[in-house]
Amino acid sequence: MENVDFNLLTALDVLLDEASVTGAARRLGLSPSAMSRTLTRLRSTTGDPLLVRAGRHLVPTPYAVDIRERVHVLTQDVQDVLRPRHGELDLKALDRTFTLRANEGFLNVAAAPLVTAIMKEAPRVRLRFAPKPDKDALPLREGRIDLEIGVRGASAPEVRSRLLFRDTFVGVARIGHSLFVDGDISVARYAACRHVVASRRGTFRGPVDDALEQLGYQRTVSVVVPGFPDALEIARQSDLVTNVPRSCLANLADDLARGANLRLFQLPVKTSGIAISVMWHPRMDADPAHRWFRDTVRAVCREFLAC
């Protein structure tokens, strides 16, 4: 290890990100010639060309593509280890941007109270709400997001998580829907309805269909939308029935009480509960500002979303 210069790690991270000697030199405050010499040293150390010319541009070799994510994570971890630790956190002076990734249903309910809580304690903090098209852990690993809200997956075992609340699915239809006319809602009557479902992946099938199938029934899904708020709005204005997590209705409680043309009902089939967690990368465990941010998110969720 005596011959390994760990200063090269940061240079390698920037070079792989920029795929340009000039761009990397600009970011690191070096001259292009100095950055070119650093690339030569990296090639000698790794035994791989790393970046090769393709016309007027540089492109990464297969080895460079393979190590790019690991190099970035290692660089961030090293920087976290060497970052000076400060004393007591001054929230009034905290000047930082936090990025939180969550689905539309969560944002519809929790974004406003979360912003209120954050701004009250730390007025200089900025919040960025990022869309959640999938469960890919790469944004957490790369530091592009600070927190993620959702169901804990198995794709990133190193990711830290804390349970926020447990959720359940409920049925929703417009007031006056024929489903509410003849007493109890049976499995047969429920399955006979036409349905609108929310799916980020655009699929027509979900846990309710599996539960119905076990009982020998099949429903007709007529519409698929990206998010639960869209499904609720369609159910409000049509004869389609939907099912959503109960937490999605938290900010509709007053409207429902006043008759918002929506009525809830217990699903006639059993579906698994949903464990909603807050997730972050372990590199942020000891960061005081990040700890305050995730604690604030948990407090808001306990108040507004606990089911």
Image (cartoon, rainbow, N blue to C red):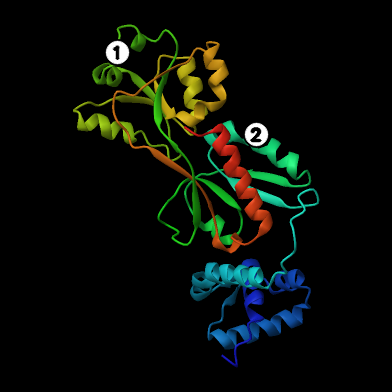
Q: Which residue is mark 2?
A: 113
Residue 306, image x, y percentages: 50, 34
**As drawn, 110 above or below 98:** above
Mark 2 residue element:
helix
Q: Amino acid at mark 2?
A: Pro
Q: Quadrant of residue 40?
A: bottom right
**As drawn, 86 above or below 11:** above
Residue at figure coordinates x 72%, y 79% from the top left: 35
Residue at figure coordinates x 51%, y 44% from the top left: 133
In the depicted view, which residue is nearer to us: 202 or 123? 123
Q: Quadrant of the N terminus?
A: bottom right
Q: Is there a contact, CB below 8 Å, between mark 1 and mark 2? A: no
Query: CA separation, marks 1 and 2?
Result: 37 Å
**As drawn, 272 above or below 60:** above
Residue 198, image x, y percentages: 44, 32
Q: Which residue is mark 1?
A: 184
Do we see residue 192 in this rendering? Answer: yes
Residue 187, image x, y percentages: 25, 21
